[in-house]
Amino acid sequence: MTAEIITIGDEILIGQIVDTNSAWIAQQLNRIGIALVQITSIADQGDAIRQALSSATSRADIILCTGGLGPTKDDVTKQTLATYFNTTLVRDVDVLAHVESIFKKFNRPMLEVNNRQADVLANARVLHNETGTAPGMWIEENEKIYIIMPGVPTEMKYLMQNEVLPKLQGLPNQYAISHRSILTAGIGESFLAEKLHSFEEDLPPHIHLAYLPKFGQVRLRLTGSSLMEQALEKEMEAYSSTLMELVKPYFVGEGDVLLEQQLLTRLKNHQLSLSTAESCTGGYLSHLITSLPGSSAVFKGGVVSYSNELKEQVLGVRASTLAAYGAVSEQVALEMALGAQKNFKADYSMAITGIAGPDGGTDDKPVGTVWIAVAGKEGAKAKLFNFGKIRLPNIERSAANALVMLFYLLKEELVD
């Protein structure tokens, strides 16, 4: 079965709020084997609602709407739905009693406009909302299912979990949907696509491969759908194994694994330790590591050496090196990495020095120039990166690429 989500509300279209409902609903539908074909955001206007419903009906079996169920004048969804389905609005006594109890609980006067919250479509099955005043509605017409829910995320989730999903799971002819994810590092999306061209060409129509790149890493996601769940799982396992073999030199891990988690696990398994030295990233690299449970078993500590004085005094970077090459240089990055390794008595270290921006660049070293070094058993090595002109992405890319460099250093020096 297929579904479409329609989010209703001017506040979404003008960017006043972010539509988190659709992402959450999509995850839940995927989990129970219902394929989402489209997400549509529209204004709280009658014509827009009617047009969106008509279009969604032509391509999906299930239409889920969120938003527009308030009692105010600008919430026209219920009246528009009544016209669209050629029915009327009726006041539900159970919903009205629930609304009255909420106002009584908070000792607030209930206005006539609040009574409208109890108005529901005559042809709908009421979905009782215990967390708010706006009920949901379930409508079945012409072999289509329409699910109407409030836009408040907590209320929508309550209705989905307690009313909608149990009903959807009981529907016949649902496809099983299966995923396999593989994280790679150190190879770009286009190079991976070229390497996996034949693999993709040989995939059956019900299985496809997606590339999800992020800062020196690419997550490969296989998605399959079939009415025969057991057969699908066997297929997915076979294709996943083949895919892992094809990307073996770049393979980090399976599932939703993070590169930094895999690095910590590998170091811990070998009883090895790690330290960091950062300049332009301001501690972001250390943050990625220490945000993970169990990092204290591996991570000795880190230094944010923004100034040259700290680079000299804490990390042991030589004044002559700074004078000859500047703080953003291969030589300084190497000495920072070796200094962090020595001072923290760590087995491995990472160091970053660069110009995050938006100012501070020169003709020779423009904004986005970053040197990253890693140190291990056999000394240190450094690499030059040239990122963009925006500060935060430069910081994120620098930290991510430091992790990738450490990943390859461990591949060279450690044997599992």
Image: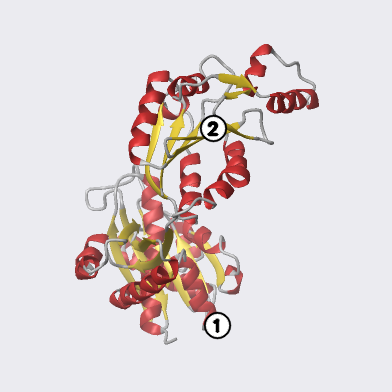
Which residue is depicted at the point 40% across and 61% down? 227
Q: Which mark is residue 271?
A: 1
Q: Position of residue 199 (x, y in %)?
A: 24, 70
Q: Is residue 326 visible?
A: no
- Residue reaching furthest to the bottom: 415
**Residue 293 or 316: which is nearer the viewer?**
293
Which residue is depicted at the point 50% across and 19% down? 79
Give the Cα separation between the discs numbered 2 and 1: 50 Å
User: Label 2: how many residues lie within 10 Å, few (<14), some (14-19) or many (20+)?
Assistant: many
| Left or right: 263 in relation to 189 | right
Tell me the amino acid under the disc marked 2.
Gly
Tell me the amino acid under the disc marked 1.
Gln
User: Label 1: how many residues lie within 10 Å, few (<14), some (14-19) or many (20+)?
Assistant: few
Q: State which mark lies toward you, 2 or 1.
A: 2
User: What kind of element bears circle 2?
Assistant: loop
Which residue is depicted at the point 66% across and 18% down? 114
Q: Which mark is residue 45?
A: none
**Residue 257 or 172: which is nearer the viewer?**
172
User: What kind of element bears circle 1?
Assistant: loop
Relative height, residue 314 to residue 59 (above, below)? below
Relative height, residue 362 to residue 224 (above, below)? above
Q: Is residue 287 visible?
A: yes
Relative height, residue 326 to residue 348 (above, below)? above
Count the marks: 2
Relative height, residue 52 to residue 191 (above, below)? above
| Left or right: 306 in relation to 212 | right
- Residue reaching furthest to the front: 142
Q: Which mark is residue 151?
A: 2
Q: Position of residue 264 (x, y in %)?
A: 51, 72
Rendered image quadrant of residue 44:
top left
